[in-house]
Amino acid sequence: MSNGASTANFIAQLSEYGVYIEDEQVLQQIISKIKGPEIRYVAVLRPDKSIITERFIFGSGSVFSLPPFPVEDINKKNYTSKFTTASDREFIQFITPITSVKSSPFDAFAITPATDKQITEKIGYVRLIYSQFRHECHRRRD
């Protein structure tokens, strides 16, 4: 599962600028490059959890309905959950916040000059869904 969390973190880091300016084309270019036999869905969302851009990646019969966005506290570094579809297919969902850091040397309006604190702002989320079956098969080959 660390591969999924790492992939979600990587997408979050690459997506910061695209989310900040809400450039769907830039974000689509980023998520179109994400590949792997276990990846079934990737999306970049706003802080209110509405979708900026998304991509479904279907493999042999893996069409599924997205589970509801979790209501648990997802403000931690990574959120991971498992879910099962009506057709008994198991998936793993990874959600990672996209953050932007403001600091006095780069953003004179973000903080008062008397402090050197950095302000981290959550500007969106990455939602990545893996096929549990494909993930296990891929891990066994390694």
Image: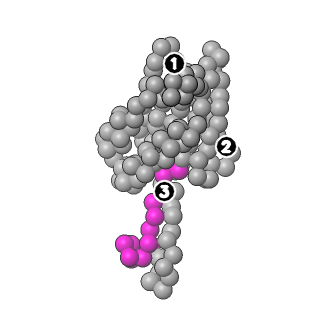
Q: Residue at x 50, y 28 (%)?
A: 142
Q: Position of residue 85 (x, y in %)?
A: 63, 21
User: Looking at numbered disc 3 in the image, what kind of residue is underneath it?
Assistant: Thr
* Mark 3 / mark 2, whichever is N-terminal: 2
**Residue in the foreground of this view, choosing between 31 and 71:** 31
- How much space separates mark 1 and mark 3, taking CA atoms? 31 Å
- How much space separates mark 3 and mark 2, taking CA atoms? 19 Å
Q: Position of residue 12 (x, y in %)?
A: 45, 48
How would you rate the neighbour count of disc 2 (Cα within 10 Å): few for under 14, some for 14-19, many for 20 or more?
A: few
**Residue in the foreground of this view, choosing between 14 and 67:** 14
Label 2, on which residue?
71
Q: Is residue 131 visible?
A: no
**Residue in the foreground of this view, choosing between 45 and 29:** 29
* Mark 1 / mark 2, whichever is N-terminal: 1
Q: Say what secondary structure mark 2 lies in.
A: loop
Q: Residue at x 44, y 72 (%)?
A: 103
Q: Which circle, 3 or 2, is nearer the viewer?
A: 3
Verify CB contact (< 8 Å) between mark 1 and mark 2. no
Region of the chain picked out in magenta, as a range: 97-110
How would you rate the neighbour count of disc 1 (Cα within 10 Å): few for under 14, some for 14-19, many for 20 or more?
A: some
- Mark drawn on residue 99: 3
User: Looking at numbered disc 1 in the image, what kind of residue is underneath it?
Assistant: Val
Q: Position of residue 114 (x, y in %)?
A: 48, 86
Left or right? Give the position of 8 relative to 108. Answer: right
Q: Where is 109 relative to 34, above or below?
A: below
Q: Say what secondary structure mark 1 lies in.
A: loop
User: Looking at numbered disc 2 in the image, what kind of residue is underneath it?
Assistant: Val
- Mark drawn on residue 63: 1
Query: Does the stretch in magenta take in 64?
Result: no
Verify CB contact (< 8 Å) between mark 3 and mark 2. no
- How much space separates mark 1 and mark 2, taking CA atoms? 24 Å
